[in-house]
Amino acid sequence: MRLSQFFVPTVKEIPADAAIPSHQLMVRSGMVRPVAAGVYAFLPLGLRVLQNVIGIVREEMNRIGAQEMLLPALSPVELWQRTGRVEAFGETLFHLKGRPLVLAPTHEEVVCELARTHIASYRDMPQIWYQIQTKFRNEPRPRSGVLRGRQFLMKDSYSLDATPEGLDRAYALHAGAYARIFSRCGIRYFVAGASSGAMGGTGSQEFMMESESGEDVVALSTGGRYAANMEVATSAMGASRWTPDDAPVSEVHTPGVRTIDELAAFLGVTHDRLAKSVVYQGGGKPVLVLMMGNDLLNEAKLASVLGTDVRPVEAERLRSLTGADGGSIGPVGLRGFTILADERLRGGCGLVSGANRNDYHLAHIDLARDCAIEGYHDFRTVQEAEQAPDGSGPLRIARAIELGHIFKLGTKYADALGATFLDERGAGAPVVMGSYGIGLERIIACHIEQHHDADGIVWGASLAPFDVQLIAVGGRSAAVAETAEALYSEMGEAGIDVLFDDRADTGPGFKFKDADLLGMPCQVIVGERNLAAGQIEIKERGTGRRSLVPRAALTANVKELVTRKDEAWNQ
Amino acid sequence: MRLSQFFVPTVKEIPADAAIPSHQLMVRSGMVRPVAAGVYAFLPLGLRVLQNVIGIVREEMNRIGAQEMLLPALSPVELWQRTGRVEAFGETLFHLKGRPLVLAPTHEEVVCELARTHIASYRDMPQIWYQIQTKFRNEPRPRSGVLRGRQFLMKDSYSLDATPEGLDRAYALHAGAYARIFSRCGIRYFVAGASSGAMGGTGSQEFMMESESGEDVVALSTGGRYAANMEVATSAMGASRWTPDDAPVSEVHTPGVRTIDELAAFLGVTHDRLAKSVVYQGGGKPVLVLMMGNDLLNEAKLASVLGTDVRPVEAERLRSLTGADGGSIGPVGLRGFTILADERLRGGCGLVSGANRNDYHLAHIDLARDCAIEGYHDFRTVQEAEQAPDGSGPLRIARAIELGHIFKLGTKYADALGATFLDERGAGAPVVMGSYGIGLERIIACHIEQHHDADGIVWGASLAPFDVQLIAVGGRSAAVAETAEALYSEMGEAGIDVLFDDRADTGPGFKFKDADLLGMPCQVIVGERNLAAGQIEIKERGTGRRSLVPRAALTANVKELVTRKDEAWNQ
């Protein structure tokens, strides 16, 4: 491709709205342009990268026996009502005016309907169906370029099985395919335990990349063996030992004491004797959750237990519900609440908690004896430096970007939509589903986040839009122009993808800067002085290493360089 | 691909809502399934065909130097307001609830915005940009399967030029590419002059296929040299000769005379002396159009002249506007109307028309002398058997399906959106645009319309999802099973795409019926009796010709058959 005829509108300035390197570089290199908030056009250079990503994804999905189809973006709203997801997605679901249609943000419903209509027997399964298709989400705050947009390309796949074991197999196949996809795309990633969120189901994992600009927070053990989204992360906090305490509940005057630290100091007890109350609203009744000492409640874990979104109850309402302010609220004698407790408090006795009366607490609480606890669950937010639950060392808390997400859905959708089949004994049973997604533009952005420097992008071989940028400098020299033209043909015939900077009216400085910005793995520079000595310069973008090669050996040298890189990435 | 593991839900019954062969066969062969009215899922077999189409389209677009990009479906409504197309598209434009976004039915606005931002100089052109992307149109009556859906894949391209001559070149390049695309896709098509409609611009042509189920009507000369959409078709109707008539206008009592035929008989004159008045509403004032004799007004031509949609004025309103009923209305002395006349009446005198008084007509009308005609245009609907305007013989009126449409837009969009560049003299000028579209699913449906028989689809080689359907019959014979497996590998290694009907529980009759329905160009049948004689049967789907080939020569034979067909289609 000749740059003089290729629409690549590069820009020197960093776009005002672009905070992260991938966003800046995708705009500056002319890969994308915004059309509306969170809506991007892929220009020719960007599309070449996207097609490389699609090629890799397609190969790896086909390799696990997945069948490609293409499902529509328009989806009947009625289908989403039946699974309760019009509500679950809420504002992020795009509705059309004047027709009962939504723009699908994912395709469980449509796939499940296909399964309901066409999967009659256990013999019709297993099936893995996938598509590479545009998704729509009405993000309230689109940002970070293509990382969080309102429309984006996704590879989504769905497994249909007769048994949970079948689902386990399909899930494992996907985990393998995803690992190969991200490796081949040159991304350093990790796999984290994750929450199923609005998707529902029995388990899920995220493929993630550590990044300060990530929207997710994860806990990672230093060795890297343990990794989990904070929404589900746990740590090896030992269970407390409870000393039997038969004393009855008694009120203690605690004037001016507000925090757990103040309370511990005032009473002269350790934090694990204190049961802090936090109050949330979610669904029906208000919920009081008891946490040990200063342990922080993890709202995602609470939401997952309750099966609904949650929000803290405001101070005023708190007072009218309990008769006290936050800091003096407690579970004993409290009515009209769902009362839950963190797993660490299971079996707790001899505890202190709020008295539902300002400036007073209750001591000698035995949870089983004195409170109506409806359940103990893990509600705790893990903290930096705690030990990983699998013994793999202390935890580090970091931000991360989600690259892919795999879900064991189980029978949630089949139950809602009536997708049943006849099993081996001739009995009806719901189809067991899995769901698996990768954001394709996101792969590009993440690759750039990990592969760039101050001058621009540093493409890995598998995603690079071209193998080589060929630069002719010294526009007036006929020898330079002729040699560059000859090399362009020669490399093309050798199967090397070349972007030829043949612009006549652009100086060498601009050409070098553009080549570094666009980031092809290999630059071939035809200059007057070197050429006079029969030499061509090669610059490897990744290392910056420059070498001079005899004219006759140039194509063979470049071919070797390009192939070696390909192999490295594709191992 | 093994049919036992491939999701191809074939059906015997013709779907109740499917009126035309391609719709019936695409559903029956398991290529597509409806998800909502006018919204289809492409299942794995259908997607393979779609990918073949995409491959051909991409090759031919790249061949003319077009650059592929990918523009978003979400589009700011504000952009469409500025070009007046929110109104022009009306109900067919999908709007989103709660955001000022529409789903793009085409991309002139977005492309023009890109041009405005990035095309600064005549040196930045020519450009041809294309994409293969999903379009959305809120069709009031989706029908005929994928032929008229609410979402569909389109190859749309846009040319940007500095001069009208540049546009002519880009338009010619597209005409060539389209001819190659439809030929390679095995479609018998013709090119027709067309109306620019809501797109605007200075000229357009349609690539069409004759079909009884088409929504367009065209006039074709028998030799096929002349072809035009009825919206613009003309014929070689000689101009009338006018005999000067100095007599003043005089009223004639014509009791009970309603039609042109009755009037001609009553007055004893030929039809070309009669000026019939038809009245339309479109935009501002009502419009009276004079047509010669029984000539039919072509509403599309009138709309094109007025630049707005038109509708006939109702009887009641007609009476209140003119004081008379239809049949007695005329142009003389009429106020409050825009008065236009058909080209055939230019220079007309000695004419009879309505008197705007029931049962009366006026004679001796000289249009120039007696009427305030604002313009003469071609408003006439051509009729079967009239001579083509280019002398290529009598016209035939037929129904047709539009496959592609190419438009010279000129500067309409650049003017509306302010997309200007500096020309060679340094002066600002608007970008000259062209717009070119092909519906991709439509190519598949049209191919099937032309290539099917009572048993199913008869794929041409270039679109066929597989080259060969391999059928093992006689499930209990180990020799048959082994040979079929061996041939499956052997043909695969020879680069032949094989769909292997390896279903163990399906009888030969069903397998043969399915193979004919799915329509691969070549069937390879491994049967017990033939195999015992060392023979394999080949059936060519197109001709039905069967031949027996020695086992050892099978793959070479099939390879030759498949290659020969490929070449025939790809010439």
Image (cartoon, coloured by chain):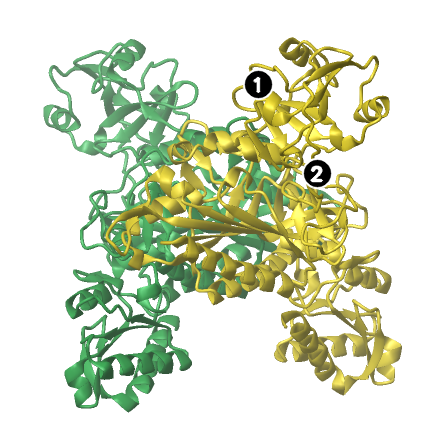
Chain colours: A yellow, B green
Quarter of the figure that contains the N terminus of chain A: bottom right
Above/below status of A163 relative to B307:
below
Q: Which residue is mark 2?
A: A240
Q: Is residue A180 left or right of residue A482?
A: left
Chain under callout 1: A
Above/below status of B306 relative to B16:
above
Q: Is residue A268 left or right of residue A17?
A: right
Residue A493, percent from left and from top = 62, 79
Quarter of the figure that contains the C terminus of chain A: bottom right
Q: Nearer the viewer, mark 2 or mark 1?
A: 2
Give the amino acid type for the residue marked by disc 2 in the picture. Ser
Q: Is residue B571 left or right of residue A488?
A: left
Residue B19, percent from left and from top = 21, 46
Q: Earlier in the sequence, mark 2 or mark 1?
A: 2
Chain under callout 2: A
* Numbered-mark total: 2
> A297 or B132: nearer the eye?
A297
> B374 or A63: nearer the eye?
A63
Q: Specify the quadrant of the image occupied by residue A286.
A: top right
Under circle 1, the secondary element is loop
What is the crowding at mark 2: few (fewer than 14 residues within 10 Å), some, or many (at least 20)?
A: some
Could you confirm whether marks 2 and 1 are on the same chain?
A: yes
Q: Is residue B549 visible?
A: yes
